[in-house]
Image: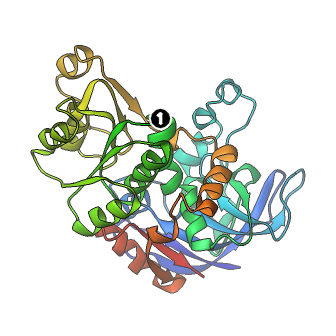
Amino acid sequence: MTQAAILTTPGEPLSIRDIDVAVPGPGEVAVDVQATGVCHSDVGVFSGELPAPLPLVLGHEGAGIVADVGEGVDGLAVGDHVVLSWLPSCGTCYFCERGESHLCGRPRTMLGAHTMPDGSTRMSLDGDPVRQFCGLGSFAQRTVVPAGAAIPIAADIPMSSAALLGCGVLTGFGAAVNTGGVRVGDSVAVIGCGGVGLNAIQGARIAGATTIVAIDMHPERLALAAKLGATQTITAGDDVVRQVQKLTGRRGADVVVEVAGRPATVQQAVAMARRGGTAVLVGAAPGVGIDEVFNNVVMAGKVVKGCLYGSAHIKRDIPRLVDLYRSGSLMLDELVTETFGFDAINDAVNYCAGENGARAVVVR
């Protein structure tokens, strides 16, 4: 038995219950979750904005310690410290062999049905199955995941910081570096400076961008953006395109990373990219479109790119991010703006829903 925070009705508080967690099967590992971040996607399902089958254990940004190892698992052992990833690849399909493991088809069941890749779940309550968000369900004190979803890290990395590598840091950093291809000397604008956007700023800084413009409506997030590498900050509003153009020699930014996911900000992202520039859409949701495609994209020779999970290769990029953290280049501890105990997990969800700080982390 282990405790988990279960969503049974959208908008209603999570229910902390004792659940059964099965032993790991072949190719799986059990992980005792030590820390889990609360992401906007968790809040979207919690509120009902993003539909999902219930009952469901939320959480897809976590870190913990391997507690048990299933048959046929190599490279992981009991006691290993790991970061959980919600996009483990198969390693052998067309996309994986092309180095595009973030497009692998294997995790699609995990993301759509919130189960293991075979469509089953390792969690149950009173004999009835409970689904695991994105195949992880890190709002539980123990979970069972595919071995490929557990990326080993050194034991001295703080768990509350390591947890963020599983989603917000990897997505934001990768949006700038992998998807956007930010280069030395580039100008970059980031719209939305929550947990993902702040790491797009860090990625742009580490990649060598010389102008990094942070755009958000919350002053405390803009202040943190400046600490993490933004060279200018702008309060979100109707005139942000003009302001970005003014800061970039009236050309517009070389790369724009849009994280807010609102129709107006998607339009602004495309408009503030320079001719021949790139707009990376991280936060765009169903129903968000781009007006005036011909004038804003075709005639301007712009590239509009979708970004899934920072176009990351998790077994390459998570160790890389750990190395950047160790060197002092990548700031993780500063992103944890509030911590909550497991029994206060609903307070953590409300903190995130209120767009407070960078990241709330729930710790054991």
Q: Residue at x 17, y 53 (%)?
A: 236
Examine the rendered structure and indicate whether residue 208 appears above or below residue 254: below
Where residue 42 appears, as percent x and y from the top left, is 44, 61
Q: Quadrant of the N terminus?
A: bottom right
Where residue 284 appears, as percent x and y from the top left, is 33, 41
Q: Residue at x 49, y 60 (%)?
A: 54
Q: How is the image coloured?
A: rainbow
- Camera-nearest residue between 253 and 28: 253
In the image: residue 77, left or right of residue 163: right
Query: From this viewpoint, is residue 118 visible?
Result: no
- Amino acid type of disc 1? Thr
Where residue 45 appears, as percent x and y from the top left, is 40, 59
Q: Residue at x 14, y 43 (%)?
A: 243
Query: From this viewpoint, is residue 197 visible?
Result: yes
Examine the rendered structure and indicate whether residue 316 appears above or below residue 226: above
Residue projecting furthest to the left: 238
Quarter residue 282 falls in: top left
Q: Residue at x 30, y 65 (%)?
A: 221
Local packing at callout 1 (Cα closer than 10 Å; few below 14, some 14-19, many 20+) is many
Residue where numbered disc 1 is placed: 179
